[in-house]
Amino acid sequence: MNLTQTLLTGAIALAVATSAQAQGFPTKPIRLVVTFPAAGAPDILARLFADKAQFGQPVMIDNVPGAGGNIGADKVAKAPADGYTLVMATVGTHSINGSLYPKMPYDMVKDFSPIAHVASAPNLLVVTNDLPVKNVAELISYMKAHPNKLSFGSPGIGSSVHVSGELFKSMTGTTMQHVPYKGRQFAIPDLVGGQIQLMFDNMPSALPMAKDGKIRALAQTTAKRSPAAPDVPTVAETVPGFEATTWFAMFAPAGTPRDVVMRINAEMVRVFKLPEVVDKLKTLGLEPWISTPEELAKYQASEIVKWAKVVKDSGARAE
């Protein structure tokens, strides 16, 4: 057998093995890494998927927070490319952090195989009840009258919550201090208690608390009002052009077999089109958004360019 025949035989054997692997996938539990602590939007989405997925094997949630989601995402980037380790990615871990952190442990594009978008959501600009402002215009006036007096919290550097605040500062010519936490559950008690005065929190986390009167919702960050909060104006209604959409998507390590990626994609499509799941997401202010791997890759590329400009213009950096 000559070299060409040997290579051809090897390629065919590899293709057959890969196809067989995909057809039998999964044969053991799937680990879905969430790069932030429990109770936030990524965790909610991951647990919804884990609860409804029908792989014949469980989907185990693994919360690995830290460094704006980089620690958890890096674990998936370096995991075997077999479909058994996935990440519930965020706009931060896969679009923003590459511009914000001077040294990234992974490449946001080259180290991952896109699977599908999951959902998108506005962030909600919320303030402590003691802050004497009722709308965005009053907040801007207060911030200009009291430079750097206010502090805004986030669940980590590079999160959409953080960069929404930086974009707000940049577009309004105001100043305030950023206080990063290890997760939103650590930031919210400080917001309610007045240690920090505002946040651009994910709507699924912030809206129920605002409805309960624990904090005050001033505005949402998307270009149009979410059906989940039709009475809450957008920041853009006061600051034209302001827009910050947070999104969530699932990725596998780079090199994961295409058939395995599409098996997971198909199950995501099924789960996130279930009427009860769609209703749950909309109640929380999340908009279901399922895509092909190619659509996710194209969108991610455009988001990396967009947020690189925002980070540069705002002067934000990973402290």
Image: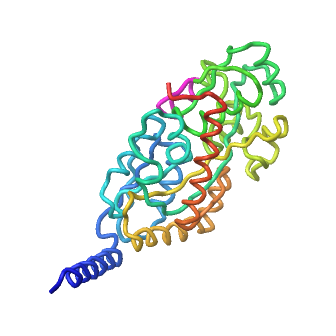
| 118 over 196 or under it: above or below | below
How many numbered callouts?
0
In the image, residue 49 lies in the stretch drawn in magenta: no
Does residue 47 lie above or below 19 as drawn?
above
Between 53 and 305, which is closer to the camera in this rendering?
305
Q: Position of residue 63 (x, y in %)?
A: 41, 44
Does the magenta segment cover residue 183? Answer: yes
**Left or right relative to 184: residue 168:** right
**Residue occupying the far left of the picture:** 1
Q: Could you tell me which residue is drawn at 81 percent across and 35 percent down?
A: 239
The one nearer the camera, 265 or 311, is 311
The colour scheme of the drawn protein is rainbow
Q: Residue at x 35, y 75 (%)?
A: 22
Q: 169 left or right of 289?
A: right
Q: Quadrant of the N terminus?
A: bottom left
Residue 225 in the image, given as x and y percentages of width and height: 78, 48
Quarter occupied by residue 65: top left
Q: Position of residue 130 (x, y in %)?
A: 72, 19
Q: Residue at x 47, y 49 (%)?
A: 108
Residue 249 appears at what percent x and percent y? 53, 55
Q: Which residues are the magenta region?
A: 179-190
Quadrant position of residue 25? bottom left
Q: In the picture shown, does residue 127 fall above or below 8?
A: above
Q: Residue at x 55, y 38 (%)?
A: 159
